[in-house]
């Protein structure tokens, strides 16, 4: 047992040392630009335009990837954010075998295909994102603004389908969810708020 614990500790130490060395000596700006372009191209293959006015890395350990004036445009909707901050969680990524990071968004505006409706505005949005083979999971979701959202969800990037969800949604413009209740498993509560629950394998 002691040998197993010692071997586990040494493995974790080796991985952490590798990540620290990679961070200190690898050309970070070049790597960041490379991965951003890969993301832009992958989005373009899905018919999505992804743009950012500035891309930088701030801090030491933990460092932050900061994107400014980010714009995402899809066929049916678009979104803009003044700042998107991504904080990689290295140890959690190692233990969960999935790249994981905290995501913090400031001044998020979303335009929906609803005639006569102004864009949705969020002052803040935050979550923890993990990339698994079966999908991208956003947990610990919190938002402030036109909609107050909390909970978690999993999206399949290949199909752009919402595979799983457990969300509570309320706020000044929660009535907009009436338009989506035929497409998503939304339920209106007596309080006026909504819940969105979907388990893997469900069609709606």
Image: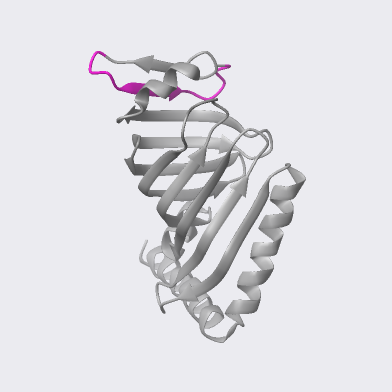
Whether the magenta-drawn stretch holds residue 199 is answered as: yes
What secondary structure is the stretch in magenta mostly built from? loop
- Outermost residue toward the left? 191
Q: Residue at x 54, y 32 (%)?
A: 112
Q: Quadrant of residue 172?
A: top left
- Outermost residue toward the bottom? 25
- Outermost residue toward the right? 45
Q: Is residue 188 left or right of residue 153?
A: left
> 150 or 136, which is in the foreground?
150
Residue range highlighted in magenta: 190-203
Quarter of the picture containing the C terminus is top right
- How many marks the image carries: the answer is 0
> 80 or 5, which is in the foreground?
80
Q: Quadrant of residue 29?
A: bottom right
Measuring from the top left, give residue 189's x and y in whole percent: 29, 15
Q: Residue at x 46, y 58 (%)?
A: 82
Q: Residue at x 52, y 50 (%)?
A: 80
Q: Residue at x 38, y 65 (%)?
A: 5
Measuring from the top left, give residue 97's x and y in whole percent: 52, 54
């Amino acid at each position: 047992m002691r040998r197993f614990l010692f071997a586990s500790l040494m493995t974790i130490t080796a991985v952490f040392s590798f990540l620290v060395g990679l961070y200190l000596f690898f050309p970070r700006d070049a790597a960041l630009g490379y991965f951003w372009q890969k993301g832009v191209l992958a989005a373009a293959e899905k018919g999505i335009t992804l743009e950012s006015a500035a891309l930088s890395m701030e801090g030491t350990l933990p460092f932050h990837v900061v994107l400014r004036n980010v714009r995402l445009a899809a066929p049916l909707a678009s979104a803009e954010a003044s700042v998107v901050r991504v904080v990689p969680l290295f140890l959690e990524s190692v233990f969960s075998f999935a790249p994981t990071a905290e995501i913090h968004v400031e001044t998020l505006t979303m335009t929906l295909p609803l005639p006569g409706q102004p864009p949705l505005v969020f002052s803040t949005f935050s979550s923890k994102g993990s990339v698994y083979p079966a999908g991208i999971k956003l947990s610990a979701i919190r938002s402030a603004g036109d909609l107050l959202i909390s909970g978690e969800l999993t999206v399949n990037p290949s199909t752009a389908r919402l595979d799983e969800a457990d969300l509570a949604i309320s706020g000044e413009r929660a009535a907009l969810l009436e338009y989506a209740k035929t497409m998503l498993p939304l339920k209106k509560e007596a309080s006026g708020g909504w819940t969105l629950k979907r388990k893997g394998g469900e069609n709606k």
